Amino acid sequence: MSDRKYNPHDIETKWQQVWADAHLYHATEDAGKPKKYVLEMFPYPSGDIHMGHVRNYTIGDVVARQAVMKGYSVLHPIGWDAFGLPAENAAIKSNSHPAKWTYANIETQAASFKRMGFSYDWDRTVKSCDPEYYRWGQYIFLKFWERGLVERKSSPVNWCPDCATVLANEQVVGDGVCWRCKSHVQKRELEQWYFKITDYAQELLDDLDKLPGWPERVKTMQANWIGRSEGAEVEFELCDVAGEPSGEKITVFTTRPDTLFGCTFFLLAPEHPRVKEFVAGTQYEADVMAVVEKASRETAVERQLGEREKNGAFTGRYVINPVNGEKVPVWVSDYVLMDYGTGAVMAVPSGDQRDFEFARKYGLAIPPVVVADDDPLLAELSGATDRVMADVPWDEAFNGDGVMVQSAQFTGMRGGKASEGMQAVTAWLAERGAGDASINFRLRDWLISRQRYWGNPIPAVHCPTCGLVPVPEADLPVVLPMDIDITKGETLADHPEFYETTCPKCGGAAKRETDTMDTFTCSSWYYMRYCDARNDAMPFEKDKVDYWMPVDQYIGGIEHAILHLLYSRFFTKVLRDLGMLSFDEPFTNLLTQGMVKKDGETMSKSKGNVVAPEEMIAKFGADTLRAYILFMAPPDKDLEWSYEGVEGMYRWLSRVWRFVTETTEEVHAGCGVAASGDAAAKTLHREMHRVTGKVTDDIERFQFNTAIAAMMELTNAAYDYRNAVAAGSRDLALIKEVAERLTLMLAPFAPHMCEELWRETFGVEGSVHRASWPEFDASAAVADELELAVQVNGKVRGKVTV
RNA sequence: GGCGGCGUAUCCGAAUUGGCACAGGAAGCGGACUUAAAAUCCGCCGACCCCCCGGGGUUUGUGGGUUCGAAUCCCACCGCCGCCACCA
């Protein structure tokens, strides 16, 4: 018989040990059961866990535990995203080594996860900084390379001065700051390694439709990031210095070829490679170079701060508009981006607000070409195929749908995005070899090289004779050397014993690549490794991945809406094309959990509003913390921490504990009747079935807060029954069933307490976490009598009891 | 500027998707038990207006609309949050 008082601490540590010894949560591929892969984003080992971790991993744990009880074969693993800069910074601060800091934190976090009672299969743990893991990251890199998806090229890249490394576009956030250290990012021209994610841009966009289990806003963010634009490429013929046609073509991308007749000037980005050549030694050189230099001085931040004053200068050159043979001047302007489209733009000031502002500032013509249906100008210009008006009477550009005017044979057609006129102009250009329909993406290739030590070494060799040579698979892993003094700011480039090597191709002296890979390469496939975590012959067996994958439920923070989730989708598609697996998308259902706040702000040490999980465990136990963090709000919403709230949760768990232990004593003592069937018993019986249905349903919908609320209602109904019926007359079968059902349904939330009640109080053989989830009888949940409201004109006018 | 989300009692939140608005918890108040306290158990618990003291009416950020019926759908506005942003 258990203690009368609920004492979480002894119970929790006791069962944690029992579960660990029995490998209770070991996952096996069981062909006789449906599978469920429940995964939470693996943590970065920066110190001990915080409340955000508690919330994230508790959600996953409840889902995983209930799935086991419902008869699924469940995979619920954990690991660590262990490479990365914070480890280097911490090592510098503490005059230590990144590995030491990282492994120590992993130990701390692992202990905390165990103390929280999470049901992980610890035999599948992955640490991305272990050679047994990262060697397969290198292997995958080589496979990508074989497939032509690895590229080393020179281009303007994002440089974080504080992290002293380059960053991927996705890692530049907010107003042009580093995702990790929030420093302002600079632009530098550097040669770097890329994964050609743009090869998959269309599929990454299209397949968002295959993800009905993802939040709409995450899909919208990814679609915006990929940024598909339909339009046309148009070729303009360049004129020479004397203004005569040179025969050379210069291409632009436009989403509005229907406005081509309104093009009155042509723009180049300040970084455009032709700019210097065009103005060298001319009277325009000084003005143009002033614009170029001003733009280059501006940081990425300033250029990304939305709309600003547009600056420009005439280059002295002209291009010929292919639709009307008009010579239009070529300008340089700082609002044209070199890394989108072709770095050159046809300007149509009447149809584009930016071009409009630029034209007004520099006195360039603004002829109308697409006019709104309700614009009086339409009547005035109706039927005019030639340009009779060179300047619109408008205050701003018009970019909507309307009627084409002053556009030769296209005059009178519908103009606008995806319009008849747009198609007609594109077709006309294509016939004459002056353009064609085209699609442009905002997505850029993924810059994966980092000039940092604590990461996965890129398996490549620079040979003076053979060029870039991949490290042969047999030579993997390229081991990250441990004898490095990070406190002196050393990187692999400071260690000749690392980089001095021989070329795998010709055998001559060569230099090993000293950059490491972006940590997001490590996190792009770890969930596949869990399926076959100890394989030392390949990253994973196809059969095992095909059994467990895709992840049925993925849970993590919204901050990965683009970064990690996009990269993982990309990896999955490439690995599929490499024949290593056979599905298209890695995560079928995605839950993005909200943040845990205190006093309306995110918890942080600098704000001094951190509530440490260990402090709450010490006070109330892990079960109370788990149940509380799920009870306070739906999982996708932010949650405001309240100390009074935790005490309330502890009170309720104690109340359940008392009910179960006391009624079990009554049952054992035979103090009551076998079955009573009176009104009070009927009410409790009905409530028990109603709540079973509600809890089952709510966990499926991730409404953990209402699932717990329903169990509280059942607890209240159970106490009502005890108050209504005297001891000795109580229905023993009923109160026993209520106690058992409560224990089973609460087990995923408060696993230790329920295990204690199940095995010690009830005396059942085997774990409650292997027991079957309670069935419910929908008809038993329906009341015999029902009060119906009678509405007349939507107002309650009476009530009838049926 | 664009896109997306949100707004319900003192606070956190229900309302399974158009059908009795506010379940559950917290806070607060009262009672039982106790010499007393804690713990526990029981009960009460939004506001405003009207009232023949039985009760009735209004109220889901604001204002409209659709509907027999709206917290829920539509339009406009206000407020808060997030993401993107000179992407041609």
Image (cartoon, rainbow, N blue to C red):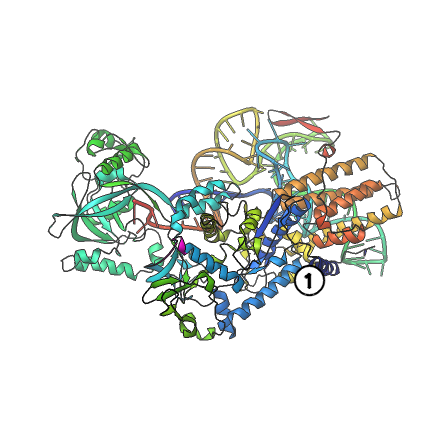
Name the side, left or right, on which A82 lies relative to A387: right
Q: Nearer the viewer, residue A571 or B68?
A: A571
Question: In the current view of this chain or complex, which residue is farthest to the front?
Answer: A506
Question: Is residue A581 on the magenta stretch?
Answer: no
**Quadrant for the N terminus of chain A in the image:** bottom right
The picture places residue A81, in percent across and down from the top left corner, at 53, 60
Q: Nearer the viewer, residue A384 or A701?
A: A701
**Above or below, comparing residue A539 to residue A359 in the picture:** below
Which residue is drawn at the image coordinates 38% and 59% (left, top)? A193
The image quadrant that residue A191 belongs to is: bottom left
**Above or below, comparing residue A439 to residue A148 in the picture:** above
Name the side, left or right, on which A56 lies relative to A513: right
Name the side, left or right, on which A456 lies relative to A748: left
The picture places residue B83, in percent across and down from the top left corner, at 44, 51
The picture places residue A559, in percent across and down from the top left corner, at 49, 53
Task: Look at label 1 and name its amino acid.
Answer: Ala
**Above or below, comparing residue B54 to residue A314 in the picture:** above
Parent chain of label 1: A
Label 1, residues with CA under 10 Å away: few <14, some 14-19, many ≥20 = few
The image quadrant that residue A518 belongs to is: bottom left
Q: What span is in magenta?
A: A145-152
Give the secondary structure at mark 1.
Answer: helix
Examine the rendering and report whether any part of residue A350 can be seen: no
Question: Is residue A146 on the magenta stretch?
Answer: yes
Q: Badge 1 is on which residue?
A: A618
Examine the rendering and report whether any part of residue A225 can be seen: yes
Q: Nearer the viewer, residue A387 or A132?
A: A132
Q: How many marks?
A: 1
The image quadrant that residue A424 belongs to is: top left
The picture places residue A127, in percent across and down from the top left corner, at 55, 61
**Quadrant for the C terminus of chain A in the image:** top right
